[in-house]
Image (spheres, helix red, strand yellow):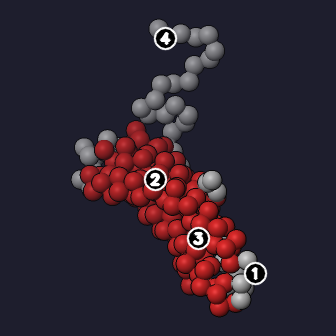
Amino acid sequence: MPAGGSAAAAAVAMAAGLVEKSARLSTAQWIGASNVGKRAAVLRKLAAILVDADATAYTDYVKALRSARGLHTAERERILAPARERIVEVPLTITRAAAEVAELAVMIAMHGNPNLRSDATVAAHLAAAAAQSAATTLAANLPAASDDARLAEARSLASEASARARPLHARGRAGGRGRGRARSRGSGRR
């Protein structure tokens, strides 16, 4: 059953898909668009795999907890350690992917097809939110007083992704360039 990490991974996949599309349609405006699109495609596929990986890691951890119930400390730790490692590593991988997608989205928003700036902006904000979400999941999966360096890395990546996305705004008004103008109800095309 999917949980927060899976939802974050799904958001990364969606954001990467927006970047991939925006990059594909930006090759005339920016020479680097093709490479950004290729990397976004790789990250989209990775994120799709991470949706299930997070759910599996959590399920395996719950099974390990049940198996370790009533055992002595050393034996209990031998059973729990690998499962605990996965419920930390998967959200960290999601955070890393999300941060990279946010960075790619900003690049496309700044250099790509101006008609797709809003899509790239949405991708950047979605990826930043996914990075924050995955970092939250990672923190929840560590012991309360943990000083695990992976938590610091995840929080830093999430913060950087948010900082990159924050200044982006879609240009123009609603229905801006490349989109039809908003019409009042009942008005038809003329």
Quick check: 168 above or below 118? below
Q: Amino acid at mark 3?
A: Ile
Q: Earlier in the sequence, mark 4 or mark 2?
A: 2
Q: Which residue is mark 4?
A: 189
Q: Nearer the viewer, mark 3 or mark 1?
A: 1
In what element is the residue under mark 2? helix
Q: Earlier in the sequence, mark 1 or mark 4?
A: 1
In the image, taking residue 27 as reference, residue 18 lies left or right, namely right
Depth check: give the residue in front, 14 or 122.
14
Q: CA distance from mark 3 to mark 1?
A: 22 Å
Q: Which mark is residue 70?
A: 1
Depth check: give the residue in front, 125 or 10.
10
Q: CA distance from mark 4 to mark 3?
A: 54 Å
Q: Which mark is residue 108?
A: none
| Residue at point 70%, 81% (across, down) | 143
Q: Nearer the viewer, mark 1 or mark 4?
A: 1
Q: CA distance from mark 2 to mark 3?
A: 17 Å
In what element is the residue under mark 3? helix
